[in-house]
Amino acid sequence: MTIIPQPKNRRRVLIASLLSIIPGLGQIYLGEVQRGLVLLFGLPAQTAIFWAIGGQWLAATTVIIWAWNILDARKLARGTKVSLAVPILLLVVLNLAAGWHVTKIDLYELATGVPNMRRIGVSLFQPQFVVRDVRASAVYTVPGPDVTKLGYRSEPASDAPNISVSPDSVVKGQNVTVSGRKFPSNQNGVLRINVGSDWQKISIKTDSNGRFISKFVNQSTEPGDYIVEAIIGLPFNQWHPSETLKLTSRLMLETIFLALVGTAMSIIVTVPLSFFGARNLMKTSRAGRIAYAATRGLFNVLRSIEVLIIAVMLTAAVGIGPFAGVLALAIHGIGALGKLYSEAIESIEQGPIEAITATGASKLQVIAFAVVPQIIPQFISFTMYRWDINVRMATVIGLVGGGGIGYILMQYIGLLQWKEAATAIWLIAAVVMSMDYASAVIREKLL
């Protein structure tokens, strides 16, 4: 049996349909205010986003949701609700298409890049932990307007094998002389010269004094720093720790202490502030509520700024190195730990607080004897967890000049030294896993 709408209902349906020409107005007219506001502001905003990213065809497809909006208003006017599943699913698909467009995903580029990925992947499983040869490197420069010298390339020890490049600033076609000293005597080797994305190789041999001299013609035109590496075999297949392992181990220790100091600085600031950021302690007075809002606002601001952005700004202020990394971790840690500490205080039992308050204790005494004993275990757990996170973060902020192992890793990758990069990556992985296990054990023992 067909139900014929009454005149009043027909009028209601007509009005809702006409109002829905502007998305959401029909729903608001019918009392579905939240639904209507989402359509009124959300649909134009989504269309504008698609248009702004250059996806005009995506913007045009939102007319489907506009048509659904009219249908929805008509159904509501008749007393039924249309499911939101269809428009939500459509929006998800459209936004995924927009993401594909914005990120410029190119499957052809992925397919053609497989050989390079395979070469990199193989190198990652050939880290230079130990070597059967002696290596030394030097850098020469092709001058240009934006050329910067490589960092973390300290002078070798007086008794260590080393090479020198003369001249150290050259143009294309100019002869370069490489001199090596203090290598194993009478041994064959190879000289590797970084040429763009590849390596030029020249055979060399040391004399009875462990010296060699070799020449090559610079083929590079792109301004920048280029590495020259001498690799001389050791007699009797003697194995020894590589220079890469020694350097990355030292910088890994720097990274661990960088994270430790950054965490400690965060704790010093955050512990007292966290009490002001706990609603249950600050809600009793107007001044307390203001302090709560200000403290929580500070925590949210510091936590919302990515640590890499903070590190970049600090390297501009205090220079490249671990000090900038420590400050970046400390500032970001104040926001992160502040939220955790404050929420830990808010979750405590109120019974001890009420009991001690009833004895006439002051506010400070209540905190000392009723609050602190309850929060110590959680504070320790959160602190260990944050140090664990900071070790991982410290390896990343080194990529932007924040010191530690990340800085040298970036150089290895930039110079296509994948085996050296693999050494740093595996060392980072080993330390992070060890730290994760150690922090879990410590938390278990302390708590």
Image (cartoon, rainbow, N blue to C red):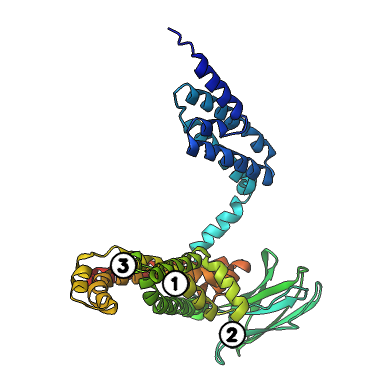
- Quadrant where the image shows the C terminus: bottom left
Residue 146, which numbered label?
A: none
Mark 3 is on which residue type?
A: Ile
Crowdedness near tag 2: few (<14), some (14–19) or many (≥20) residues, C-alpha within 10 Å:
few
Please name the residue that numbered disc 1 is placed on: 334
Q: Which residue is mark 2?
A: 154
Q: Position of residue 293 (x, y in %)?
A: 44, 66
Is 278 displayed left or right of 14 in the figure?
Answer: left
Q: Do residues under tags 1 and 3 come within 8 Å of each other at their CB atoms?
A: no
Note whether 380 is above or below 121 in the view shown.
below
Examine the image and state in which quarter residue 273 appears. bottom left
Q: Secondary structure at mark 1?
A: helix
Sequence-first tag of 1 and 3: 1
At a point 58% along the width and 86% down the height, the residue shown is 161
- The residue pinned by badge 3 equals 345
Foreground: disc 1 or disc 2: 1
Whole-Å distance between the Cαs marked 1 and 2?
34 Å
Residue 270, by quadrant, is: bottom left
Q: Residue at horizontal 49%, vertical 73%? A: 331
CA gap, disc 1 to disc 3? 16 Å
